[in-house]
Image (tube, helix red, strand yellow):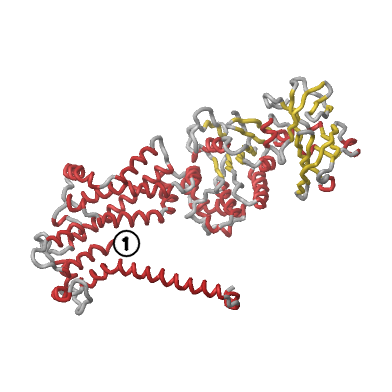
Amino acid sequence: MTLEADDGEFIALVGPSGCGKSTLLNMIAGLETVTSGEIYIGDRLVNSVPPKDRDIAMVFQSYALYPTMSVRENITFGMESRGVPKAEQNAAVDRVAAFLQIEPLLKRKPGQLSGGQRQRVAMGRALVRDPKLFLFDEPLSNLDAKLRVDMRTEIKKLHAKVGKTTVYVTHDQVEAMTLASRIAVMYRGELQQFDRPHNVYSRPANLFVAGFMGSPSMNFLPGKTEPSGIRLESGDLLATPVPSGASENVILGLRPEHIHRADAETLARRPNSARVTAAVEVVEPTGAETIVVMRLGQQEIVGRFAPDMAPSVDETVELALDMDHACLFDPTTERLL
Amino acid sequence: MADLSIAIDDPAARTARRRYAINRTIIYGLLLLFSAVYLLPLAVVVMNSFRPLPEIAQHGLINFPRTIQFSAWIDAWSTYCINGTCEGMKRNFFNSLYMTIPATIISTFLGALNGYILSKWRFPGSEFLFTCMLLGVFIPGQIALLPWAYLLGQLGLQNSVQGLVLVHVIQGLSFTTLFCRNFYVSIPDDLIKAARIDGAGFWRIFRKIVLPISPPILIVTVIWQFTGIWNEFLFGVVLTSGREQPITAALVALAASETNVRNYDVMSAGVLIGALPPLLIY
């Protein structure tokens, strides 16, 4: 795989567990040896450079704070190892502590901190180095849901302020979408797509990326190409231009938010909508939106509705599928057409 | 809740309470009995060490002291004759100390270092090496006896405390490595990675991060090694003789050197002198 990050970029490595994203991060950090290929940081080939000389800082999933040291000692440990003078160390700690608002914690031990505080200290330890490259290894996955959202925003703010190149590993596609300037989706050790979040989401390179990014995930509807559109297994014909490379069988991918009720207003606003009829099976209100599972012929499809627009169970609804946002995949190569 | 159970005078509850009380009484009664059985020999020895010899002869080995004397302790410590020299067990006691303390410290330190390497700096074959070291746990010391005698002879360390230190360091390495390695496996690898990125090397990580987390396992290892080496008899009696023997060997010599009268008072005091340091370590 080839990945290149521009200066100051925020790259998210995302993929299911075991896809090799953490291994890749460890190789960038120099914690695992590279058997083949080359890694450059700036213009320097770092394959054989030890971690401490790569000018990087890393935040770990478990935070990896040294348990017997106070927060201050945790932050200064790296500088002490490198022989930075005491006065300079203190100035750096003060600067970082003020920046992250952790001054009151400096004397405490990691065991006396909450999850969010540990997270801040771990970031402080990375920041104090002022490195060329920040590496984050699933830094938020040990936090509870609410704190995770808060810290996500913090990291984004932090990156905006510091402006350093960052590589961020996560299995959470929402984190990747919200934080990254570009996302690298990995699966089984291979790079699937490397692009801006919007493109990864709306034009996924293949079925895996399409299914992995977004929750609830994209609906996949198998169908056959006809001159005027795509005939689904349910018998519905969806009128849409068929790309030239398409074979007879295709898979139509449509995100839940592109399924609407077929009322006059929607049809007027989205002229390229295809109309189908589906039976409602399950309705899951989440508050801000309502997830509705429906049956289209033999096929289950999931739609996302505004609460006031949501149908009720056993209702039969007229749907407008927004074909402008549909993706077509080749069922054998699984690639986007 | 307590109020509730008292307010309702339920016969079933009363029976249950009574049964609970009976059960407790039986359990504690048995526990007391067993602890008495275990403590009795120690009590007999302690009492005999303070009883004059004629009194022991007159009233039997197991009895309460009628008069108290301390001369048996002084005898056993500095004047009693063992193997023809009449200096008591003082010298053997210090032999044991000079053997046990360095051997405990060195074997614990090496065990910690081995454990650190075998858990956090794995290399090709490190698991195999660990398995081999583990085998040492199962090999009885008797097997190594003759090779050790030969080796110490070659090294010029025969009949010396230093020789015993070497033997006990090597013999103890399997255990100390096993203890420490299994403890260090539970330290998250991220900690070591973070320290490496922070620029710390092998020794700095060991000193600043691993050792400060280690007291729980180091205490176990030290107790294990200290009591084990102090109480060890076989190597002491085979590889050293006379004035160089550790206290365990001297105690046996003390018991065996009697020709006519058995000096139970001195023997009791000697045994207690020999047993004190491991007790203090606990």
The N terminus of chain A - image quarter: top right
Give how far across and how far down residue A172 sits, in percent: 65, 42
Going by the image, does A142 lie left or right of B274? right
Q: Which amino acid does label 1 sit on?
A: Ile
Going by the image, does B116 lie left or right of A104? left
Mark 1 — residue?
A: B281
Instruction: Give neighbour class at mark 1: few <14, some 14-19, many 20+ (Cα, 10 Å).
Output: few
Q: Residue at x 82, y 34 (%)?
A: A321
Of residues A214 and B14, the one drawn nearer to the viewer in this rendering: B14
Asked whether residue B198 appears in the rendered view, the answer is no
Give how far across and how far down residue A163 sits, in percent: 64, 42
Of residues B64 and A58, the one drawn nearer to the viewer in this rendering: B64
Q: Which residue is drawn at 33% across and 40% down?
A: B132
Q: In this view, does A269 lie above or below B85?
A: above
Going by the image, does A192 lie left or right of B60? right
Q: Which residue lies furthest to the bottom in this view?
A: B66
Of residues B232 and B241, the one drawn nearer to the viewer in this rendering: B232
Occupied quadrant, residue A115: bottom right
Q: Is residue B263 above or below residue B156?
A: below
Give how far across and how far down residue B263 sits, in percent: 14, 68
Callout 1: residue from which chain?
A: B
Going by the image, does B244 lie left or right of A279? left
Q: Which residue is drawn at 48% across and 52% down?
A: A86
Q: In this view, does A320 lie above or below B11?
A: above
